[in-house]
Image (spheres, rainbow, N blue to C red):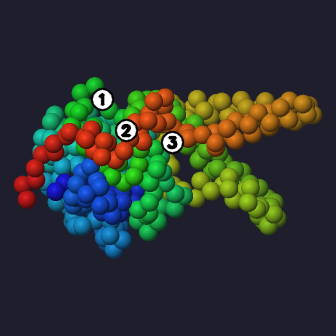
Amino acid sequence: MVRISIIGLGLIGTSLGMALRSAEASESPLGALEVVGWDRDQRAVKEARGRLAIDREARTLVEAVRDAQIIVVATPVLAIREVFAQLGPLLASGTVVTDVASTKAEVAQWAATLPSGVAYVGGHPMAGKEKAGAKAADPELFNGAIYCLTTGRSTPQAALEAVEAMVRTVGAKPYYIDPEEHDVYVAGISHLPMLLSVGLVEITGRSAAWKEMAALAATGFRDVSRLASGDPEMHRDILLTNRVGLQRWIDEMISFLLEVRDQVDEGDAEDIEALLQRVREQREGWLETRPGLRPGEDAFLHQPEPERRNLLTFRLPRRRS
């Protein structure tokens, strides 16, 4: 039996535990699982246990990671550095550590402080909700989602296969990517949209006419402002750990808005319509495809289940109990 410890039982950590525990052992490349959970907030631990996300509650970090073969750090991003420092003296050689952080380059640098013999594989499931906490958890959250995995030059193959097996067990699709490349990409397609949503709510909410405007706000405002309802702590950490990637896209958006402002000011109907037509076609084309797959990956991700399991040759260290 494989023991997986989840450190941090918010939306993602609890959803991951629920998905792992609901998987059939005969269908999972990991086989039979035991999921242990810990969070500094014991109310989150109780909630996760009540939602059947964990088999066993841990009262301390030491208890949580004892004899664990895979450890998933699902805390806010900035807390990961401290968690890694605390984990170092506790982990046996052969333990695999992964995380679910929305940024990867800085987290990979922190992971370098883990002791030799402990393998790190970065992870980021491209799935979530605007609601936070264990109460919002969903065992289907990862089903069909792209799950980014980042590695270093010295990452053992067994560790890669173990984390990939976990990803497949929850129904997600592994997507290997360089940490810096990941951060630039998600800055544009995930973090900038969140910031734009926040900006919309901020500038309209500070208007003296907001009360009157609020009565008129309908589906368009609701849809664009949805991401502003996300977890403030998580979004703060994303902004602070992806500065380089975000700055580029923020500058691009500022240039775009200034360009459109000039077109509107000049009454440039032809260019405005051309812009709207172009982006409409681009979005429609994206919706018709399966975004996120590199050339050749589609065939790999859709191999029959038995063949995929045969690719997994890792051997996790045995537990002492």
Q: Are marks 2 and 1 in contact (CB under 8 Å)?
A: no
Q: Quick one: 288 or 132, which is closer to the camera?
A: 288
Question: Tag 1, which secondary structure?
Answer: loop
Question: Tag 3, which secondary structure?
Answer: helix
Snapshot quadrant of residue 164: top left
In the image, which is nearer the foreground, mark 3 or mark 1? 1
In the image, which is nearer the foreground, mark 2 or mark 3? 2
The spot of residue 62 in percent (x, y) is: 17, 56
* Mark 2 or 3, nearer chain start: 2
In the image, which is nearer the foreground, mark 2 or mark 1? 2
Task: Report the residue that reaches farthest toward the bottom.
Answer: 50
Crowd rating for badge 1 (residues with CA inside 10 Å; few <14, some 14–19, many 20+): some
Task: Identify the mark at residue 149; answer none if there is no mark.
Answer: 2
- Left or right relative to 172: residue 254: right
| Residue occupying image coordinates x 28% and y 25% | 153
Question: Tag 2, which secondary structure?
Answer: strand
**Residue under label 1:** 152
